[in-house]
Image (tube, coloured by chain):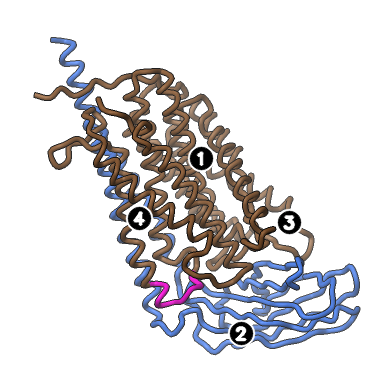
Amino acid sequence: MRQGAPVWLTAGAAALLVTAVPGLVIAAAAPVAAHVTITHAGPGRPSAVEVRLDPPAAARGGELLLSIYNGKGVVNRHVLRPGADGVYRAAYPFPTRGVWRYYMRFGAGQAGFTSAGVASISPDAGSVDTFTAAFRSGSAGVPAAVQPLGYAAFGLIAAGALAGVSAILARLRRARCEARSGRSGAARS
Amino acid sequence: MGPDLWTLGVLPVLAAGALAGLLGIYWDISWHIDKGRDTLFTPPHDFIYTSLVIVLVVSGYALWRDRRDSPVHLRAGGRGVHAGVLIVAAGAALVLVFVPLDDLWHRLFGVDVTLWGPMHLVGILGLTVACFGGLASAWLERGLAGDPRRGRLFGDAGLFFACLLAGWAVLVVAEYEFMVPQYPSVWHPVLLAALPVFPLVLISRLAPRPWAATITAIGFTALRIAIACWLIAVSHRGLAGNSRPAIPLLIPTGLAVDWLLLRRAPGWLAGLAGGVVTLAANAALIDASAPAAGGIRLFWDAATLLRALGPALVLSALSGAAAASAAGSLGAGGAPGRPERPARAAPRVRA
């Protein structure tokens, strides 16, 4: 009699949990700011956006989500990787002059850091717009250990659920085997 | 034998509940991105609550009403309990755990909690397990059905649940599809390769119809297009934001999984190949659809793909093996590639 289901499901769950751990590492401590410089190339051409984190190692070399949008349908939203100098760069078009909104975040989940606000954009050729954005922690004052504890609780609950489903499937397999052998035994006699 | 799970209304209501939850969560993410903070009873939340309540009520109702005795009814508490309904009940138990824990998590961290918040994951897992229970129930009922037409109905219900299960599996990467990820990009290819392989390999082994994995992938795509159309429609009424999730390409994966089934490939190999095809197809699709500059751009660069490749392939193989094993437990016994004929299972004779 085979009982592959519990073994495979448990192994799969364990592998998922083990590989999940590195992604849950908590990012830097507050306070963090970003100095944003937007250099415009003129109408019809994308502008060069440069984001320098302060302190530079705040994101520990991780990715930065940078969204700049005008609220009227134009949205620039990329995930940026840091360059060799730890600076994040993107090419975003700004077809209209005026107040644009921005949203930035780095770090994992609730322990990440976010910044949102508005910036005045003048997209004339050669002009440069700059602003400084302050980040706030998403942990809302909750101790840093709470998020990993939450994921540990999820891991336990998920492992329990998968083990339960595996046990049901194993019992079903056993019951079907017994029913089949009972039928063949009855046919022989 | 008493009434089956379709006659009792369990399977259609469960299918509607799983669909409502899926729609509600995508709608809720769109709402959070573009409309900001929400309250307890927003329209997308209502869909999610409906889904949670349906799973709880349906599992309890089925446990109470289904009094049959057959090889797929496991002995528990002195009576037979349908194995598929037991799995739905496991999902319901997770939902019961989810509700207070999610409330606690939101009290700690506020309204803006990531989809991958641990308690959200408990809820998603609960609804996914319930959906898997629906698929298992439909398949087991197919084996109990004496009438071939009834068997086909349950087979097609199984296909529908497989489409929904693929939807729930892919939902996990929704923040990447909306391009608002809160975790490193490397997780997107890893999870997109591994998770949909489970429903596709499972349904290909059960084979309620030939090329079942391909049909499921097409059904999944149609489902996601329907959800996108819904989001567009409600956004015109101010009930959703402008953000739409990217729809992953799973049809080549379904074709690969079905083709490998015809070649009698083991589950892990079907999973591995499915993962590779998903990565290749979606990397090409993402590159082809990316704007030159600006816009909302989801992309996997070479470094991301390289880092993702090892874990993606290992998890895809494990996912395929788990699906094949689950299919074996559900009685996908016949020759690979050939749909099992609906057959009446012998009722257990009471002493």
Give the percent coordinates (x, y) of residue B336: 43, 24
Relative to A111, residue A151 above or below: above
Relative to A125, residue B145 above or below: above
Relative to A56, residue A184 above or below: above
Mark 4 and mark 2 lie on one chain; the one further toward the N terminus is 4
Chain letter, brown:
B
Kind of residue sitting beneath label 1: Cys
| Separation (CA) of disc 4 from disc 3 | 35 Å
The residue at the far left in this view is B351
| Label 2 sits on residue | A56
Kind of residue sitting beneath label 4: Ala
Give the percent coordinates (x, y) of residue B63: 26, 41
Q: Nearer the viewer, residue A44 or B105?
A: B105
Q: Nearer the viewer, residue B237 or A51?
A: B237
| Label 1 sits on residue | B163
* In this rendering, the label closer to the viewer, 1 or 2: 1
Q: Quadrant of the N terminus of chain B?
A: top left
| Separation (CA) of disc 4 from disc 2 | 35 Å
Q: Which residues are magenta?
A: B105-113
Query: Are labels 1 and 2 on one chain?
Result: no
- Kindly tell me whether residue A106 is visible in this rendering: yes
Chain letter, blue:
A
